[in-house]
Structure formats: structure tokens, C-alpha cells
Amino acid sequence: MDGEVILLDAYASMFGMRLRIALAEKGVKYEYREENLPKKSPFLFQMNPIHKKVPVLIHNGKPICESLIALQYIDEVWHDKNPLLPSDPYKRAQARLWADFVDQKVHTLGRKTWSAKGEEQEAAKKEFIEALKVLEGELGEKPYFGGEEFGYVDVALIPFYSWFHAYETCGNFKIGTQCPKFVAWTKRSMQRESVSKSLADPEKVYDFFLILKKHFGVE
Amino acid sequence: MAKEDVLLLDFWVSPFCSRVKIALAEKGVAYQQRGEDIFGGKSELLLKSNPIYQKVPVLLHDGKPMCESTNIVQYIDETWPSPPLLPSSAYDRARARFWADFIDKKLFDAGGNIWKTKGEDQAAAKKELIQILKYLEGGLGDKDYFGGDSFGFVDIIAIPLTNWFFAYEKFGNFKVEEECPKFAAWTKRCLGRESVAKTLPDPQQVVEFVSMMRKMHGIE
């Protein structure tokens, strides 16, 4: 059976959304526990003492930290339903590379579009769009990054869509008009129940984002 | 396996390239190696094989390129399964990936902050490196290697970075062994393996390379 599965998460966390989607794809029953960020619970510190971050997947009492690692864990444990990673080692290596690209570029640059100022912010906005265009190139004519099937890279990337409204509002730029292929892929992905039920509402993300901004002292 | 099937785009002092070489050696895979001139000009093949990051190492297997050393080591483990580098249980694999990710995010940059800075900044960087090594000591516990009794994935990810410690110690004026004896013992244990000893460059050569980098950064 599935065993006891707990997800320590925060509603607006794009990393937490990845795991919500994956667990839904696999039909795994779990207990969702909301962390009241930026305040963190003692339980979170106990489960993730080094990084002290959400999400943490706790399976039968054992914590798994870092969303891409937890994603791979979910895919390996519940491997018979909706596999996320391909079985071919080369294709798996490509999938891991692109998921890592999402973390290194989309997340880092997305953050800079609101935390940086002046010239640095303008540069970040430009580089952010460029990163999405690189992803559009990788997607090509395929319906999903995984090919015909929704997969690992799709799960890694789609949660960032819920943050676009916050990035656009704060950074005063439009993402969709510059990356139409990307937008088409997001619409396709949102048709999946696992995605539409797991993604945070962009307005609520924006409200959370304003709290975060204040907390980090960015005006 | 014919040598031409596996090609590594390499830079001699890169600990990330060393990871790939050690993994291939552990698996007994024959390969060709091509040194890249990182400062002089990267090859067409490198730029074409790794257009996103334009970095070494790149492993080409039957002409198909793979990038990012931790990713490449996992590919090597999946393609040539014996002897296994990652553990067999899903949870242990997640733990191994966690430590590899931690090392990737923290260790090399912390070391870089030591040789790139002076005074208070350097003191803070040294403190950070020691904290990182203490976390790693916690992950190691009483085991011989991070995976248990056998040399494996996390050991391969970590050991080449220790090749640069001699340089950090020299420019930072401290000794890892005094601060983290358990980590130092693990390092010695790994250096006793042929795949590691034959792969890692002479630490003195690394010191000379870092010294050159310090001059380039205007730190001397």
C-alpha cells in the first residue's frame, strides 16, 4: 500500500506544487500540511534541518527534501502509474538537465524580476524571456516536454505559471505575448486535473508574494 | 566497448570532469578524452554539445551529448550498471541525491569564496566551508563511505572537490584535518582507491592554478 504520506508545503510554493501534481498523477493519498511562511514550524526544522525549506515529503516518517529529488522518489516508488521520467538513460539525462535548467534559470531569473532594481531588473526581465524561449526551442512541436506524455520536466516547470502574474505586475512586463508557444503548452498542461487542482491561484500567489517582498525588505 | 563510443570533453583541473573520469574508471569503461582550452577558446564540439551552459564536462556516448557532471554520473550508473554507484532502495537513492545536490550547491562556491577574498570576508568563507564539511560529516556518520561499505555516488561527487582543499588551506591559512578529522579520514580512504588516485591532479598543480586565478582576479 501507499503507507503514510505527508506533504509539508506552502500554498504558493512552486516547488510544493510540483509534488502536489506528481502525487495526484500517481493517485497517492496524502496529508497536506500548510507551513505559515515566512514563519516556519519546529517540525519543518526537524524534517529539513539543513535547508529549512518546504516542500518536504515525509513517507512512513522518513523525510525527502528538495522538490526534484522528491519528484524522482515519487516516480520510483509509485512507478506503475503515469511514469514521469522516461526509461531510456539518455532521455532521463536530458529530462534531468532541463528540470535543472528550470531551477537554475526560470526560478533564479524570475526572482530577480521582482527583487532587483533598475538596470539589473531590466536585464533579468530580458534574460527571463530568453530562458523561456530556450525552453520553447526544447519543446519544439511536441505537446509536452516529455513527448506525447506529460512528464518530469512538465511537472517541474508548470508551477511557475502561477507566479507569472506576480512577476508581470511587479516587473511591469508581459510574458505571454513574447512566448506564445510556451503559453500554448501551459494551457495544454492546465487541462490535466492534477495540474489544475494543484496550482495555486495567481491572485493568491500575488498576495503571498507581497508579504514575501515586505519580509525581504524589497519595496 | 570500443574506445570511440565514449568521448569526454575535459579540462584537467576541473573537479567536475574528475567526477566523470572516476565514475568511468569504476565501471571499467574505456573512453577518449579531449582537453578543452577554457581560457583560449572553447571548441566547436563543446559549444554545439552544450549550447545552454557551454561548460565541461560533456560526455558524448555514441555521439549523444550529456551535460552537468552529477547528471552524467547518474547516466553512467544507469548505462553500465556494474558495480552500482547509487543504492538500490528509493529512499537511500533520495538521500544520496540530496547529499550530491547539497555538495553541488555549496561546496565549490564556499571554497571559491576563500581564495577569492581577504580579511573578514575570508574568515566568514572559512567558517562557512567548515560548517558545510560538518554537515557532510553528519551525513557520513560512522560509515566508511557515504553509501555505506562501498565507494559510491556521493563519494564520487565529493572527492574531486577535496583536491582543491590544499589550495583553500594555503590561501586561507587553516587545516581541514584539524577542524573536520572525520571528513579528512574519509578523504584519505577515498584517495586510496585507484580510480581516484589515478584521476585527481597533483594538489600542488591545483595550488598553482588557483594562484594564477587569484592574479587574474587581482587578489594577490
Image: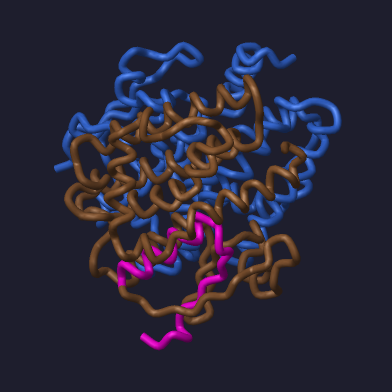
Chain colours: A blue, B brown
Would residue A119 appear left or right of B167 to someone viewing this image?
A: right
Q: Where is residue B53 in the image (x, y as percent from the top left)?
A: 64, 57
Q: Position of residue B25 (x, y in %)?
A: 35, 70
Residue occupying the point 58% across, 64% down: B11
Q: Is residue B186 magenta?
A: no
Q: Quadrant of the C terminus of chain A?
A: top right
Residue occupying the point 43% across, 59% down: B19
Would residue A125 appear left or right of A94 to someone viewing this image?
A: right
Write the start and end of the magenta stretch as one range.
Answer: B1-27
Give the tally of numbered discs.
0
Q: Is residue A39 above or below residue B40?
A: above
Q: Where is residue B88 in the image (x, y as percent from the top left)?
A: 20, 55
Judge by depth and name the residue closer to the eye, A47 or A55.
A47
Residue A97 in sight: no
Residue occupying the point 63% across, 45% down: A105
In this view, the residue farthest toward the right is: A119
* Quarter-of-image position of residue A2: top left
Would residue B179 appear left or right of A17 to someone viewing this image?
A: left
Judge by depth and name the residue closer to the eye, B135 or A95.
B135
Q: Does the magenta stretch include residue B17?
A: yes
Q: In which quarter of the image is the N terminus of chain A?
A: top left
Q: Where is residue B208 in the image (x, y as percent from the top left)?
A: 61, 52
Residue A157 in sight: yes
Residue occupying the point 36% across, 46% down: B97
Q: Is residue A17 above or below residue A95?
A: above
